[in-house]
Amino acid sequence: MATIGLSKVFILDKYFAELQKFWETERKLQDVSSSNEAVHLQQCLKTLSSELVTLRHRLHAGGGDGPSNPPNLYTQPDTCKLATVHLKAAVCPEVPDLIHLPGPLTEDAILRTLHARFFNREYFTNVGPILLCVNPYQDVSNPLTLSSANVAAARCPQLRHVVQEAARQQSDTGYPQAIILSGENGSGKTYTSMLVLRQLFDVAGGGSETDAFKHLAAAFTVLRSLGCAKTTINAQSSRIGHFIEVQVTGGALYRTKIHCYFLDQTRVVQPFPNEKNYHIFYQMLAGLSQEERAKLHLKGYSVQNLRYLSRGDTSQNESEDATRFETWKSCLSVLGIPFLDVVRVLAAVLLLGNIQFSPSEGGSADAVADLLGVSSVDLFQGFTTRTRQVRGQLVKTPCDPHVASQVRDALAKALYCRTVATIVRRANSLKRMGSGTLSSDSNESVHNQIDNGSQHASTVGSSGAKSSKSMNVLNSAVRHATDGFIGILDMFGFEDVRPSQLEQLCINLCAETMQHFYNTHVFKSSLEACREEGVFTDLEVDYADNVPCIDLISSLRTGLSRWTMLTMCPALTSSHH
């Protein structure tokens, strides 16, 4: 009885909200005292309101299986677990696709449906071709890897359907497909990308025993430590964008490639308060042996006395970090990357932060110079002097401590970024075992095929059937160059941190651009397709168009390039504009 009552409360809540909106509109448009419809609406509202209150009291007094008001979705993980226990017996409306939602399709109805499915442990809901996932925040401290994603991926048939549909579209059309993951920071995009990638390997026939799977799994484990950091809302926050290419030829997985975009460089030298630097630094300090510490000049150093780490959260689980460092080390060997070559650069980055240029503190660059294989005198001179070309002559001037510190930090960020880029390039250039075929990083053959097709097309002619034939040749070359291409895009989500820096502006600009793509794909393209097919509708979707916001930031006249130029020329005043 309590379950039936709870279901009725849910339905009444939905229609009560609708009637309330109609009543507000009616009250604004005409005089209530002279409107019979308004009086009827008011009576309906009173009846529904009294029935709703009565049902809530009965449920509360009878000790039903669920609370009268379901808790907020955006609560802390512990609160969500408690609420799930209370609502585990509640009846959830079986609406796997929101386009089939009965009754008035409103924002309130959609949120309540997602709310009910969430507490029924149904975290995936379709909205037509779009799959919506609500993060349950379970196993938040477990860094999912491609190898360990098999069990979790098996519990997500909706994701498998998305992957199968992408593979089918690619097989039927021959054109590349992309699976795009979007959401706020901490919404679980990277976690879901691992599940999608594992599903794609299973669908394309690339099991865990194949070389492509082993290499990609090792590359993701290495990049996870290099590109993830603890933030205030996510202990495993990905601070780098990924685009994974999986090429499928003849229904079988052929090769893979990873593209990395926009590594958060400022975190290397200055993490935010109560946040951490990248995981690899803490794992390295916990996992290095004493002999390795001596070789890397890290003996006696810890999180507390390394400036690039002590500025943020200094808490550390050394046993867990040491275990993950051993895994990271073994994955480097799978990729064929020398371990010492990588950790020497990472140790140099950490020690760069301890070089000071003020007379009271001083600092030595000997350890950093030894790790990088350069002269300590030349390195320190590069920090403290500035070379300019004046009238054809090179003029060297000394730098103040502030400028020298900026040069030091810039070097640290450049070393870290180039290390990540080199590892990605190395992982993409691995040869398949037993085959002379390079991975998709070797794009020379692809570009040559496109160029050859273009040259051949240009010699055919430009009139009548010859022109059509030339376009067919060019299209065939492009299709062959990108044969079997299925991509998975995992980019940054919206961030609202204080204080915000240039990185946050770029991250939000990327997220706004992706949102514009969704708006165009979901709203504008669908209506235009209906009009082209002769289906006319009076439906007008009201949504916030973010094109002015994007143009304001990315415009050549008022965008980032203009701001960068003004920053580089601080001597300019308002009289120069």
Image (tube, rainbow, N blue to C red):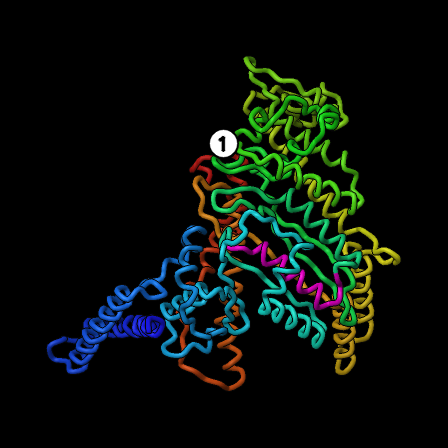
Give the quarter of the figure containing the C terminus: top left
Dividing the picture into quarters, in which one does residue 33 lie? bottom left
Does 402 lie within the magenta span? Answer: no
Vertical relation: 523 (above or below) 577: below
Q: Could you tell me if residue 439 is visible in this image? A: yes
* Secondary structure, magenta segment, majority class: helix
- Looking at the rendered structure, the secondary structure element under dot 1 is loop
In the displayed structure image, the side of residue 358 where residue 17 appears, left or right: left
Residue 83: give x, y in percent of width and height: 40, 58
Residue 199: give x, y in percent of width and height: 66, 64
Residue at 75% across, 70% down: 479
Q: Residue furthest bottom?
A: 534
Most foreground residue, 208 or 250: 208
Most foreground residue, 290 or 524: 290
Judge the density around disc 1: few (<14), some (14-19), many (≥20) Cα neighbours within 10 Å: few
Give the quarter of the figure containing the N terminus: bottom left
In the displayed structure image, the side of residue 187 where residue 73 appears, left or right: left
Dividing the picture into quarters, in which one does residue 330 lie? top right
Q: Which residue is mark 1?
A: 571
Q: Residue furthest left?
A: 33
Residue 357: give x, y in percent of width and height: 59, 19
Vertical relation: 37 (above or below) 122: below
Residue at 71% across, 63% down: 201
Amino acid identity at mark 1: Ala
Vertical relation: 217 (above or below) 485: above
Residue 268: give x, y in percent of width and height: 59, 36
**Magenta segment, which residues?**
187-207
Residue at 51% across, 57% down: 183
Dividing the picture into quarters, in which one does residue 441 lie? bottom right
In the displayed structure image, the side of residue 147 where residue 124 appears, left or right: left
Most foreground residue, 437 or 159: 159
Does 190 lie within the magenta span? Answer: yes
